[in-house]
Image (cartoon, grey):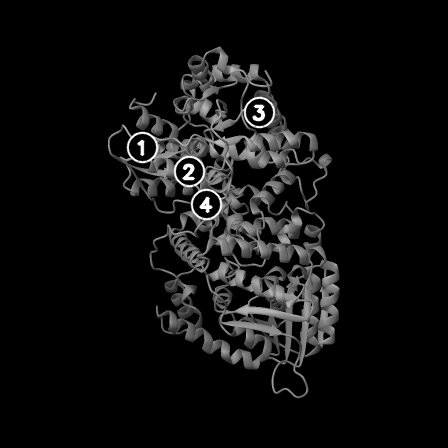
Amino acid sequence: MSQRIPVTELENSFRGRASEALADSQLRTNFRTAMDSLMRKRADAFSDPDEREDLRELGNHIKARALSKLPDLLEQLETRLTKNGVKVHWAETTEEANQIVHGIIEAKKGSQVVKGKSMVSEEMEMNDYLAERHIECLESDMGEYIVQLDGEKPSHIIMPAIHKNRHQVARLFHDKLGVEETDDVNELIRIGRRTLRKKFMEADVGVSGVNFAIAETGTLLLVENEGNGRMSTTAPPVHVAVTGIEKVVENLRDVVPLVSLLTRSALGQPITTYVNLISGPRKPDELDGPEEVHLVLLDNGRTRAFADAQMRQTLNCIRCGACMNHCPVYTRVGGHTYGEVYPGPIGKIVTPHMVGLKQVPDHPSASSLCGACGEVCPVKIPIPELLQRLRQENVKSPKEHPKVKDGGAKYSRTERAVWRLWAGLNTSPTIYRLFLWGATRFGKLTPKNVGPWTQNHSAPVPARRSLHDLARDHLGSQGTKGGRS
Amino acid sequence: MSELFYDAAPNATRVAPERPKVRNYPDKPPEVTLFGTCVMDLFFPEAGLDAIRLLEREGIRVHFPQEQSCCGQPAWTSGYVKEAREVALAQLNLLDNGRPVVVPSGSCAGMFRQHYREVFADEPETLKRVEDLAERTFELTEFLLHVCQVQWQDLGEPTQIALHTSCSARREMNTHLHARQLLGKLEKVERLEHDHESECCGFGGTFSVRMPEVAGAMVQDKTRSLMDSGAVEMVTADGGCLMNINGSLEKQEVAFRGRHLASFLWERVSGEKAS
């Protein structure tokens, strides 16, 4: 590559992190291999395109319906859950959510928490928050456990440790747990499980996420494959579920197609090994289950997205990860390059509402708009269209009142001026012809280095005669008129 | 949970089966307008001329309004709505005569058919004209296949080629299916699949200059899989991808090249060496 990015920019930009990831051949192989496999599994799970498209349409409709009455459904959910004995808490920010969770643990004088997989808890950076308050929060999902052990963040929303292959996991377990280094996947999982099994029994509080919160019945639905979700929500005396407000759906009937879409899109599974339906704490005549169940409903920018009819569609997301599995950018740079909790195409369209465009100014541009994400989204979020919208918000001047949080992050007078010139060129046939004349006549003078383009390409040399010229010669003057003539 | 860690090398070209979008096609018209696109205008003008010849061969009179420029896509995908709108409006006015419009590029055809609706979303009067343009805009391969219903005799030597389809052409226009069927009409042309065929080549308009590292990795993977396919050359119905892929191949100093599908088709059916 002929042009290197200055070192100062490297650390904090998408481009810089992407460059580092691209140079890591092991990382690229791990992602490519894993994403290929996930794409194949999804393809196999949806072998009938008509059935798939009908189901996606239904999924989109269910989510749109739920969002159209979101405030009512949330109220209904709270009423039902309360009736079922679940304590409902509302948090506008991640700070508030952490305070609530900490308060619950403190009230029980707890010091050990075991956690099932939850992306909302990643949003909250709950582990760090609790660690600062001397509470140990152990991840019980195998992938999450691996990244926690290595002091990392998840690189994928479904498969947090997907950036590592089994040799790397073997080395990690050897280094951190002092066990013998083994490449046997089953043995590695056994090692992890032995450690975790003890923790389930010792923990004071179990934390989990929620896949769907059902308003009609006051039920929290949680899908998982390892049983750690069931253990985390039933073994400790207190269960705290954390989730975003967009996870509420109207009734149990809605959940059937959504679960099918979720598990087939995510891992190509007809259904997950475990489907947990949690409807309250242990009743007096029951032998097990937690004594207390709490639900923390987090906003964190979601109502901001909700307020914008187009951006509201981001709240359709059921967090299956299919968009990242099919994304040619994500496949090459991996989840950590995005520098935020939610990577990939969905990350690019949900993160700005949470943290603002100033924090992720390059996310909207980090896409060729190839459309693979929108094509596979199980709830038909028009991801490319929303990226497009974010690009518009990103280049607005302050006077144009950007509607997305911290819009105008990429506003540049110079770039605006360039596009003004471009528009002038392309709206005036005279100037455009003059441009063609110059470009074809002096095309050979094109410099060898024309900025970023020549990092990957030879310099583009215009043809000696334009199509305008060739067509005029070929068709004669009769064939050259447009408009209403 | 064995899916936690992968190392087996996969055969990765399998994608989910598709359900083609249904479009009703009109009878073959006596006249059409060719919208040449700005990339073809400057970098692949011969391919534009070959498209004109293919249409004329079907007995259609082709118009090429000299006032045409760009569809507006570069500004649109960069977020500059006002600038995109001005350029789009100029083309809309120019093409506002009821004549079918044939575009030798899927992404520009997709701009007319899909995205002008978004560009002019707040202008009900203009939207009517946009809908009218969308209705009579055809990407070249779908026009030859479904409107002209071409019957061809293959006059070329036996050859093996790879087909690359732009993402917008694939997802907005079904161009990959149309191009495959057109190539299928040529007896002596064998189309070879390449690895990750449905994946983007990394052009994406301004994406390739805003994110040159990622775009570079994508085009390198694409060119490698095209060359590994065993094909003699690549054909594509999109000028943007062609510029991206050929520019990369040239930089890599390899002999393999791509060319526009129109030039390839013209050469096969006319028996002439393409211009």
Q: Mark 2 lies on which chain?
A: B
Q: Mark 1 points at which residue?
A: B253
Q: Which chain carries label 3?
A: B
**Disc sitting over residue A19 in the figure:** 4
* Nearer the observer, B30 or B187: B30
Q: Mark 2 points at which residue?
A: B178
Give the quarter of the image for residue A27: bottom left
Q: What element carries label 3?
A: loop
Same chain for marks 2 and 4? no
Left or right: B262 with respect to A255?
left
* Nearer the observer, B20 or A169: B20
* Nearer the observer, B66 or A190: B66
Question: How far apart are the alpha carbons under marks 3 and 1?
Answer: 46 Å
Q: Which chain carries label 4?
A: A
Residue depth check, mark 2 versus mark 3: number of the one nearer the observer: 3
| Number of other residues with Cα within 10 Å of mark 4, as a class: few under 14, some 14 to 19, many 20 or more | many
Tag 2: amino acid: His
Give the quarter of the image for residue B166: top left
Identify the mark nearer the N-term, 2 or 1: 2
Same chain for marks 3 and 1? yes
Left or right: A464 with respect to A111?
left
Q: Are marks 2 and 1 in contact (CB under 8 Å)?
A: no
What residue appears at the point 57 percent right and 20 percent down from the top-left corner? A425
Identify the mark nearer the N-term, 3 or 1: 3
Q: Where is residue A43 in the image (x, y as percent from the top left)?
A: 43, 56
Q: Are marks 2 and 4 in contact (CB under 8 Å)?
A: no
Q: Position of residue A428 (x, y in %)?
A: 59, 18
Q: Is mark 2 on a helix, strand or loop?
A: helix
Q: Mark 1 lies on which chain?
A: B
